[in-house]
Image (cartoon, rainbow, N blue to C red):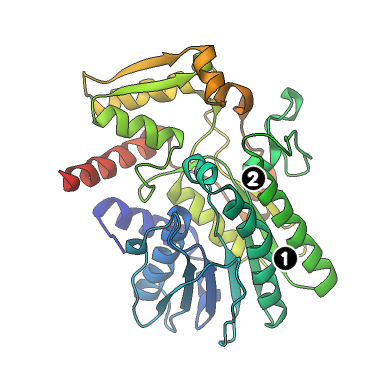
């Protein structure tokens, strides 16, 4: 697994954020589906870092990924981390006794879920059910399911910031539906197995997470903007750039995921994990990227409404997305600290290094 200075700093930060609870992982065995993806990479790297620096009795991590969008380089085999190429939508068995299961397998990038629509649905439904069947066979301490803020769709203004009990404003047959509905059915399955089979479960809903480890062809906004700016190309903005988002740096997000994984209380166990400030327009994000990259050849290009409609952004792009973090703050003691400027600078520096290696 890549460990440049930025990622090392991130892993140290995550370790410090969970220092009061990481001992719960002593000697445990974790099954992690989707470990070669962006979020999965940081999960695996954090387990590895804890084994090296914090845990007296290291934890063991079994990583599953079919590498449809994940990268094999994101996972290294060592004595405590084992990689198994596996499509979790197909039946499989794990013979070892498990203490935790993490379902982070998903095609979250629009580039990939539009290319692999049926596979996106399969991993959300069949993959989730297969993992939950394995959960039934083990006396787990927790099953952590990765959902998405996309289950909220395009929230009505009165529901922003958005709480976990918002039921959503989602199209079940629109351009994003293969991803959105796969996440919604995944949550339904997780909640049902918890009720019927008494499996301890926790659900996290990530909000606009970014940082080192993202594929540079990911298709999501910060990756697109940064790569375009570094190459001196146009940054494309749709709908006038007035849509707003909050963005969460991967270090803060990963700390939140571990807090959710290791939480064992009886309170609500569905959590927004993201950042609730600042809520910024796409215009401001593009301007910040241009400031940090400093490439005078890069400029903003506003895509007109007709062209935007042709590539579906204008029809389905949510107007605003901002989480209410009250529950995560109160129950998990989750408090994102890394500013947008600091996080984007980290990503710019990391992406610059990746691009230079390609030349």
Q: Name the residue tied to disc 1.
A: 265
Residue 81 in the image, given as x and y percentages of width and height: 40, 76
Q: Earlier in the sequence, mark 2 or mark 1?
A: 2
Disc 2 element: helix
Q: Residue at x 55, y 59 (%)?
A: 104
Image quadrant containing the N terminus: bottom left
- The outermost residue toward the left is 359
Q: Which residue is pictured at 50% across the width and 36% down the height?
A: 247
Depth check: 114 or 77 in front? 114
Are the two marked residues, 2 and 1, in contact with CB atoms closer than 8 angstroms?
no
The picture places residue 12, in percent across and down from the top left corner, at 36, 59
Residue at 63% across, 28% down: 316
**Cα distance, mark 2 to mark 1?**
33 Å
The residue singled out by tag 2 in the image is 178
Residue drawn at x 22%, y 42% as measured from the top left: 355
Residue 245 against residue 50 in the figure, above or below: above
Between label 2 and label 1, give the one nearer the viewer: 2
From the viewer's perspective, tell me whether residue 247 is left or right of residue 3.
Answer: right
Above-or-below relation of 215 to 324: below
Q: Residues within 10 Å of mark 2 (few under 14, many from 20)?
A: many
Can residue 220 be seen here?
A: yes
């Amino acid at each position: 697994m890549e460990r440049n200075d930025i990622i090392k700093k991130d892993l140290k930060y995550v370790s410090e954020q969970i220092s009061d609870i990481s001992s719960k992982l002593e000697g445990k065995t974790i099954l992690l589906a989707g470990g070669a993806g962006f979020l999965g990479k940081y999960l695996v790297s954090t387990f590895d870092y804890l084994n090296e620096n914090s845990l007296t009795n290291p934890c063991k991590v079994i990583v599953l990924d079919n590498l449809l969008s994940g990268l094999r380089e994101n996972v290294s085999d060592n004595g405590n981390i084992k990689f198994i190429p596996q499509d979790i939508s197909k039946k499989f068995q794990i013979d070892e006794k498990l203490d935790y299961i993490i379902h982070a397998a998903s095609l979250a990038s629009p580039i990939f879920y539009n290319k692999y629509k049926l596979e996106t649905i399969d991993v959300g439904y069949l993959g989730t059910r297969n993992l939950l069947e394995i959960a039934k066979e083990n006396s787990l301490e927790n099953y952590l399911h990765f959902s998405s803020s996309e289950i909220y769709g395009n929230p009505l203004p009165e529901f922003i910031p958005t709480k976990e009990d918002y039921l959503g404003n989602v199209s079940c047959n629109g351009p994003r539906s293969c991803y959105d509905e796969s996440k919604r059915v995944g949550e339904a399955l997780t909640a049902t197995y918890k009720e019927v089979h008494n499996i301890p479960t926790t659900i996290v809903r990530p909000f606009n997470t970014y940082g080192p480890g993202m594929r540079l062809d990911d298709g999501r906004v910060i990756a697109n903007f940064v790569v375009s700016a570094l190459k001196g190309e146009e940054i494309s903005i749709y709908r006038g750039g007035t849509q707003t988002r909050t963005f969460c740096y991967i270090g803060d997000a990963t700390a939140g995921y571990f807090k959710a994984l290791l939480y064992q209380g009886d309170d609500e166990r569905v959590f927004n994990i993201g950042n609730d400030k600042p809520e910024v327009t796409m215009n401001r994000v593009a301007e910040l990227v241009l400031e940090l990259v400093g490439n005078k050849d890069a400029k903003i290009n506003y895509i007109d409404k007709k062209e935007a409609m042709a590539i579906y952004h204008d029809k389905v792009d949510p107007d605003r997305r901002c989480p209410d973090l009250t529950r995560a703050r109160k129950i998990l003691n989750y408090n994102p600290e890394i500013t947008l400027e600091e996080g984007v600078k980290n990503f710019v520096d990391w992406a610059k290094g990746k691009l230079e290696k390609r030349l």
